[in-house]
């Protein structure tokens, strides 16, 4: 062997040895005593790819910074208790006592998630939405897991996907749909997946996750959550398919499996906007829309093993359909408007909150109204508001549904004549109690209680135990 070749070979061996040494020092972040042995600035996915390790992601999830962010998120979201009846107030005391045991079980791969609590939510169309409420401990672990999975899968997701993704919103999705319509794509293939969250195939989903996650313990933990089962009427039923709607891990898992649909639509050159399981594909003719519908339906049912809802899916004009609670106008310069069904739902809710038969004080009634209006305004952004009018307006609260009208229309004189003055709160009282819409429009927000500061400890369990 020539001298130059020997030097080259020696350098390669030295480089490989340095890589192995660096990987071995970064692989084991947390030892069995729960103290940090080596910190790494590499993201989980970069460390997995550069070092070739297969068991760093779970340690990445259990790092202090990640778990504290997950804990704050769970506490901020509050939510109902799971099957163990541990509520948010009891979470930290529970973790002080049990976290080190839970952590060891996670590292050893012996942790068993508890079944989710089944909750039925009636839908506006008469159906029922099934929610699965995990225990708070499982919610914490799922949140931490979702936070380390997101940077792994997020960069490869489609730009046409907007649901459950950082720095993306429903308004961006609607804006993109509006742009397609203005460009001349004035037919929409409105694709609705029937009971999507309840029909997700576990094997197909895990195969998609395993494309980028090599940590077998992490894969086993995700599979354990999918198979945790559902507690209904005191009986635990094993989950053969589906992901619990309402669990922190479900959004990222839904995007992972539907990313195949996005890639297929992109491969075919279609223009589309997808928000979770709500997908709209924009075409120029009805005939093209029918062809797209047939092809996409075959892909969804044959490859993803999901089912297209025949009754709710259709090829139609965009202004005749609803997308994320919005619709569009048929003019050449397309405008976004609140969908008629969404407006009707708003009116019904306001009537319910302001009906005279409710036996409560006006102050409490307005407080409840404010909560609903804040959420509705933050999502819909209507152009005109009833409360934006002068506070001494004669319009009483129980006709507040006039808020959604883009042009102010006064009530019929006969209707105004029937309104008794004694039912109207004074302008001074309204000015103090009702939500100031001008403040909302200017971007000001009510002060929030400060979140926990970043702790300066080395281990999540130690921080929990040291907390008051």
Image: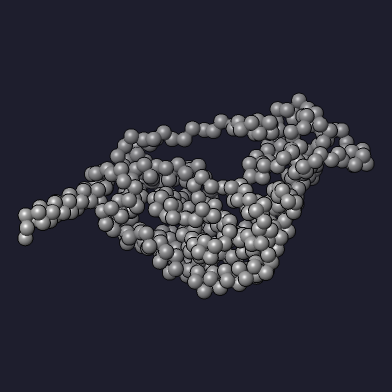
Which residue is at the front of the view, 32 or 468? 32
Q: At 47% from the left edge and 46% from the top edge, which residue is drawn?
A: 74
* Outermost residue, top side: 428
Indicate the position of residue 361 as horizontal and vertical percent values: 74, 36
- For residue 240, side relative to residue 130 (left or right): left
Indicate the position of residue 238 as horizontal and vertical percent values: 47, 68
Quadrant into which the C terminus falls: top left
Q: At 70% from the left edge and 27% from the top edge, which residue is drawn?
A: 432
- For residue 49, side relative to residue 325 (left or right): left
Which residue is at the front of the view, 466 or 67? 67
Q: How many marks?
A: 0
Indicate the position of residue 298 as horizontal and vertical percent values: 56, 73
**Image coloring type:** one colour
Which residue is at the front of the view, 14 or 441? 14
Which residue is at the front of the view, 23 or 270? 270
Q: At 24% from the left edge and 48% from the top edge, which residue is drawn?
A: 26
The image shows residue 251, relative to residue 313, as above or below, that is: above
Quadrant into which the N terminus falls: bottom left
């Amino acid at each position: 062997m020539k001298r130059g070749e020997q030097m080259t070979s020696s350098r390669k061996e030295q480089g490989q040895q340095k890589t192995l040494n660096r990987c071995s020092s970064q692989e084991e972040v947390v030892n069995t005593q729960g103290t940090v042995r080596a910190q790494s600035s590499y993201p989980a996915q970069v460390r997995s790819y550069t070092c070739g390790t297969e068991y760093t992601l779970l340690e990445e999830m259990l790092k202090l910074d990640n778990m504290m962010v997950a804990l704050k998120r769970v506490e901020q979201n509050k939510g109902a208790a799971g099957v163990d009846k541990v509520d948010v107030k009891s979470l930290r005391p529970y973790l002080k006592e049990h976290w080190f045991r839970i952590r060891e079980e996670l590292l050893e791969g012996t942790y068993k998630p508890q079944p989710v609590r089944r909750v039925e939510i009636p839908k506006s169309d008469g159906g029922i939405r099934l929610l699965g409420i995990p225990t708070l401990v499982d919610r914490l672990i799922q949140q931490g897991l979702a936070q380390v999975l997101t940077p792994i899968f997020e960069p490869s997701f489609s730009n046409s996907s907007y649901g459950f993704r950082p720095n993306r919103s429903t308004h961006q999705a609607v804006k993109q749909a509006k742009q397609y319509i203005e460009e001349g794509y004035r037919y929409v293939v409105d694709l609705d997946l029937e009971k999507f969250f309840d029909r997700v195939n576990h094997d197909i989903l895990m195969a998609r996750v395993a494309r980028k996650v090599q940590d077998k313990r992490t894969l086993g933990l995700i599979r354990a959550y999918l198979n945790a089962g559902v507690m209904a009427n005191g009986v635990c039923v094993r989950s053969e398919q589906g992901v619990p709607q309402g669990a922190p891990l479900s959004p990222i898992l839904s995007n992972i499996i539907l990313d195949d649909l996005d890639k297929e639509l992109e491969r075919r050159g279609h223009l589309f906007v997808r928000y979770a399981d709500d997908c709209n594909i924009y075409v120029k003719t009805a005939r093209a829309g029918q062809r797209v519908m047939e092809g996409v339906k075959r892909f969804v049912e044959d490859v993803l093993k999901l089912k297209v809802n025949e009754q709710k899916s259709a090829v139609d004009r965009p202004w005749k359909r609803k997308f994320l609670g919005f619709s569009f106008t048929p003019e050449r310069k397309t405008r976004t408007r609140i969908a008629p069904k969404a407006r009707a739902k708003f009116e019904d809710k306001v009537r319910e909150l302001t009906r005279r038969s409710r036996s409560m004080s006006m102050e409490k009634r307005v407080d409840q109204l404010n909560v609903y209006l804040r959420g509705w305004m933050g999502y819909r952004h209507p152009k005109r508001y009833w409360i934006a009018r002068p506070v001494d307006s004669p319009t009483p609260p129980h006709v507040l549904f006039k808020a959604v009208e883009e042009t102010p229309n006064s009530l019929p004189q006969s209707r105004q004549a029937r309104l008794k003055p004694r039912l109207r709160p004074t302008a001074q009282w309204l000015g103090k109690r009702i939500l100031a819409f001008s403040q909302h429009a200017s971007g000001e927000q009510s002060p929030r209680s400060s979140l926990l500061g970043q702790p300066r400890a080395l281990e999540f369990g130690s921080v929990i135990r040291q907390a008051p």
